[in-house]
Image (cartoon, rainbow, N blue to C red):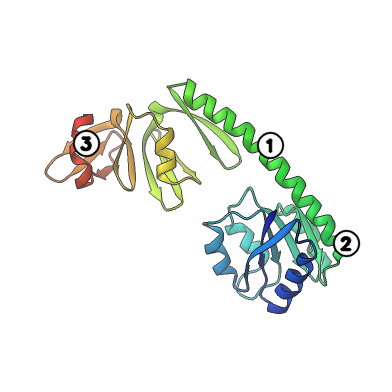
Amino acid sequence: MLKAVIVDDEPKAIEGLTWELSNFSNHIEVIKTFSIPEQALIYLSKHTPDCLFLDIQMPTMDGFQFLEQLKLKNTAVIITTAYDEYAIKALKNEAIDYLLKPIDSDDLKDTISKIKKFKTKTLNSQKFEDILINFTNNNNKKKITINTDGKLLFLNIDEIVFVESDGNYSTIFLENNQKIVVTKKLKEVNQILPEDHFFRIHNSYVINLGKIKEFLKTEGYVIMDSNQKIPVARQRKSDFLEKL
């Protein structure tokens, strides 16, 4: 069963599309609707539906501006609009399809077929990535594999200085001052880092133990080789000293 989210500033349009989708209730279910795009972005930052039906013309933020802020590579985006001149731009913005209002049942049927194909392709791609990531992370103790921006990065663990949490994202700081943002929580990143090299020193930080330059015991900070000053959580201090 496909899970769908609808974003449209017109309540009647949401009601109409929801009704049309109910005719395909064996294939798709509307789990959430939004008439305010900003609220939808908050929801989608924490949830990943199978598909998103997105209106183009909305007063506070149009559909293309919405897509610029959206980071859901595994969600099929379908543009809904009353104006066919948006069709080409919709497809260039990684939407898998567009529907002209009022939405026709036959067109919707074709769209659902495209969503299913998209999900099958995504799942197969994800399985391949998972196999590759697991193989690399379990068999190569000097490198880890990170999935970011549609590509797999093979990072040498000696390059990593520390990792910082940013809510549902994490930033990996490398010794060449490069930063890599990944769509993983710090806990997830920590799980793929080797325990004998890395330590979660704070709720917001995991550090490379081999990159510590100083430990300021009185102040409760470590200074990394890159000169970043990182706090040591009080409840983690004893475990950290044991690691050292």
Residue at the (26%, 43%) spot, across then down:
229
Q: Secondary structure at mark 3?
A: helix
Residue type, mark 1 in image: Asn
Measured as percent of width and height from the top left, residue 170 is found at: 43, 46
Residue nearer the viewer, 104 or 218: 104
* Crowd class of label 3 (few under 14; some 14 to 19; many from 20; radius 10 Å): few
Task: Kindly identify which residue carries mark 1.
Answer: 124
Task: Kindly identify which residue carries mark 2.
Answer: 106
Separation of residues labelled 3 and 1 (CA atoms): 41 Å
* Crowd class of label 1 (few under 14; some 14 to 19; many from 20; radius 10 Å): few
Residue closest to the far left:
218
Q: In terms of image quadrants, where is residue 216?
A: top left
Of labels 3 and 1, earlier in sequence is: 1
| Vertical position of residue 238 compared to residue 56: above or below | above
Measured as percent of width and height from the top left, residue 44 is found at: 56, 59
- The label on residue 238 is none
Measured as percent of width and height from the top left, residue 122 is found at: 68, 42
Residue at the (46%, 25%) spot, across then down:
143
Residue at the (75%, 49%) spot, across then down:
116
Measured as percent of width and height from the top left, residue 234 is found at: 19, 47
Residue type, mark 2 in image: Asp
Residue 233 appears in view: yes
Task: Kindly identify which residue carries mark 3.
Answer: 239
Q: In terms of image quadrants, where is residue 63?
A: bottom right
Q: Secondary structure at mark 1?
A: helix
Separation of residues labelled 2 and 3 (CA atoms): 62 Å
Q: In terms of image quadrants, where is residue 38?
A: bottom right
Instruction: Give yes or no for contact between labels 2 and 3 (Cβ–Cβ under 8 Å).
Output: no
Q: Secondary structure at mark 2?
A: helix
